[in-house]
Amino acid sequence: MLCHKTVRLLDPRTPLYKSWRPTFRLLLCREGREHMAGVSHRSSSAHTGAKSDKTVKKLSVEGNIAAGKSTFLRLLCSAQQEWSLVAEPLGKWQHVRSASHRDVDNLLQHLYADPSRWSYTFQTLSCMSRFKAQIEAPPERLLQLADPVQIYERSVYSDRFVFAKALSELGHLNEMEWSLYQDWHSFLIEEFGKRAALDGIIYLRATPGRCFERLQKRARKEEKTVTQDYLVKLHDQHERWLIEKTTDVHFQHIRDTPILVLDVDEEFEDDPLVSEQLSNKVKEFVDSL
Ligand SMILES: Nc1ncnc2c1ncn2[C@@H]1O[C@H](COP(=O)(O)OP(=O)(O)OP(=O)(O)O)[C@@H](O)[C@H]1O
Ligand SMILES: Nc1nc(=O)c2ncn([C@H]3C[C@H](O)[C@@H](CO)O3)c2[nH]1
């Protein structure tokens, strides 16, 4: 469980937060300078309108549980070998480490076994690990390329606008927890906004029934209690956020991010033709950004 001090540190209304904010800002500025001293990333310049020819295009791949994101990314990366992929930090959630790096617990297991007890803790870890991944400098080899592309498996945005929101509506995050989550999430987006910004989103769209079949086929041990109803709920959140655009997204740059929708209900894993068609669509989309 997150200690009370950390919760208060992340809550803008508390004195603890106010006393730490200047230190936090200083750290952010230092990191910012290091970042600026390197190659200018597209996401840093996108908001100033400035473009350099060595910018990294950052995209996330979004979609329901077991829609086929990892599978799709594997295919994509073999078609576009120079692109860099940042996988979802699932291992960090399954093997939570102590300060002395001992493997202490499996938070994904706890989440599904007792969602009301563990959802807030899980969203804290999932979102923090995504933030760290999203603001990390791209690998050096990527910066040597003329048109570098980095693709993330999900993002800090789906963490909030799909999962945390669904868990709040299901009552697994209570009103206080949902409010705390939104407070620190907004704070981090405002502070890191440009560095965590995306140039595009690829939405892998599959019916909840198909996802449920794939989930059962994959048979991840922690997910035995995941129901089709939960997948329907997550599907609806994706649809409201990325298709209907009725989700209340407070950040203009996220609302404006271009979206490519790919239907992945079809079984394409072993079909090179379908894989090639999908990967060509992604390439066209990336070139258009
Ligand atoms: N297009 C496809 N055709 C056939 N099988 C697929 C396809 N996409 C994924 N699968 C299978 O479905 C299962 C789930 O796929 P995968 O692990 O890629 O999902 P995911 O979206 O990354 O899941 P998660 O949300 O848990 O990260 C795997 O067993 C995979 O082999
Ligand atoms: N609650 C919750 N919030 C998230 O942000 C989130 N991201 C992924 N997951 C779950 C889905 C798969 O079981 C498994 C691997 O994707 O982890 C999440 N669950």
Image (cartoon, rainbow, N blue to C red):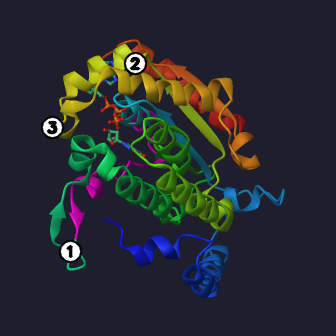
Q: CA distance from mark 3 to mark 1?
A: 24 Å
Please name the residue that numbered disc 3 is placed on.
221
Q: Amino acid at mark 2?
A: Pro
Is 274 left or right of 157, judged from the image as shown?
left
Quarter of the figure that contains the C terminus: top right
- Residue nearest the observer in this picture, 138 or 113: 113
- Neighbor class of circle 3 (other Cα within 10 Å; few <14, some 14-19, many 20+) is few
Q: Is 275 placed above or below 97 here?
A: above
Quarter-wise, where is residue 144 in the image?
Answer: bottom right
- Neighbor class of circle 1 (other Cα within 10 Å; few <14, some 14-19, many 20+) is few
Mark 1 / mark 2, whichever is N-terminal: 1
Q: Which residues are magenta?
A: 77-97
SS type, badge 3: helix
Q: Is mark 3 within 8 Å of ligand 2?
A: no
Residue with the most extreme front position: 175
Please name the residue that numbered disc 1 is placed on.
101
Where residue 65 sits: x, y (%)? 37, 31
